Amino acid sequence: MSLPQVLKNYNVFQDSDNWAGLISSFTRPKLTRKTEDVNNGGMAGPVEIDMGQDKVECSFSGNGFLISALRAYAATTVDAVGLRFVGAYQNDATGAYASVEVYVRGRYKEIDPGDAKTQTVGEFKYIMPCAYYRETINGKVMIEYDALNNILIVDGIDVLAAQRAAMGSWIV
C-alpha cells in the first residue's frame, strides 16, 4: 500500500536565527518556467518555447514581529538574506520520515504587519523574491537555482551548463 508523505512538523530559520514556534505558515517557492507560444508557418499547431526560469518567491506568516526580519528589510543586495525551511514528512504506511529542506536567498520586498488588536497574537506577513533556491530531500539536492550565476541543476543535471559554455562562461 502506498500513502503520501505528509508534513508532520517544520521549522524556519533566517540565517542563524531559529524561529521555532514563531512561524504560523510558510509558502514554499512555486517553480514556473516562462514560456512563449510559437505557431509558425509549416507547423500543425502551437508549441510552448521555454524562455527560462520565472521569478522565484516565497512568503510566510509569523506570530508577532520578528526583529531579525525587520532588521533585514531594505537590504541592499538581492541575495542578502538566507531563509531555510526544514520539514519532516512522514509516510504513515511505513512510519519513515523524509527530511525536506528548502534554502533560499533574497531580500524582503514586503512586510505586512496586519491589524493591531489587543489580546491577540497578531500575524505579520513577509514576502521575499529569491535570487537563489535549493531543495534537498534526505540530503540529496533535487533542484538548485542560482539566478546570479546562471545555474539550474535538476536531480544532479546542470541544465544550463551548455548555455554557459556557449557564452564563454565566466563560471568555473
Image (cartoon, helix red, strand yellow):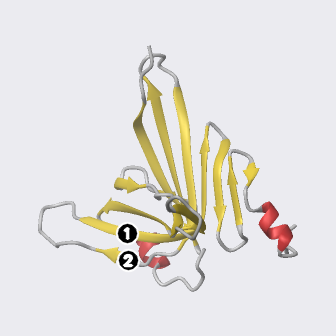
Residue 109 vertical position relative to residue 144 in the rendered view, above or below: below
- Give left or right: position of 87 versus 164: left
Residue 25 vertical position relative to residue 75 in the rendered view, above or below: above
- Give left or right: position of 151 versus 49: right
Q: Amino acid at mark 2?
A: Glu
Labels 1 and 2: the sequence-earlier one: 2
Where in the figure is residue 51, as x and y percent of width and height?
A: 59, 69
- Give left or right: position of 70 versus 142: left
Q: Inspect this view and state whether residue 86 appears.
A: yes
Where in the figure is residue 147, as x and y percent of width and height?
A: 64, 70
Q: Inspect this view and state whether residue 171 appears.
A: no
**Please, which residue is most extreme toward the front here?**
42
Q: Splitting the image into 4 quarters, where does residue 60 fall? A: bottom left
Q: Secondary structure at mark 2?
A: strand
Where in the figure is residue 138, as x and y percent of width and height?
A: 62, 36
Badges 1 and 2: C-beta atoms under 8 Å apart?
yes
* Label ID, residue 126: 1
**Please, which residue is most extreme toward the top here?**
1
- Identify which residue, 28 or 66, lies in the foreground: 28
Q: Amino acid at mark 1?
A: Tyr
Q: Secondary structure at mark 1?
A: strand
Specify the quadrant that holds the N terminus: top left
Crowdedness of circle 2 by 10 Å Cα count: few (<14), some, many (20+)? some
Where in the figure is residue 42, as x and y percent of width and height?
A: 59, 65
Mark 1 → mark 2, Cα distance in angstroms? 6 Å
Query: What residue sits 41% from the left and 21% below the top?
Result: 92
Query: What residue sits 60% from the left and 74% below the top?
Result: 79
Provide the residue designation for mark 2: 110
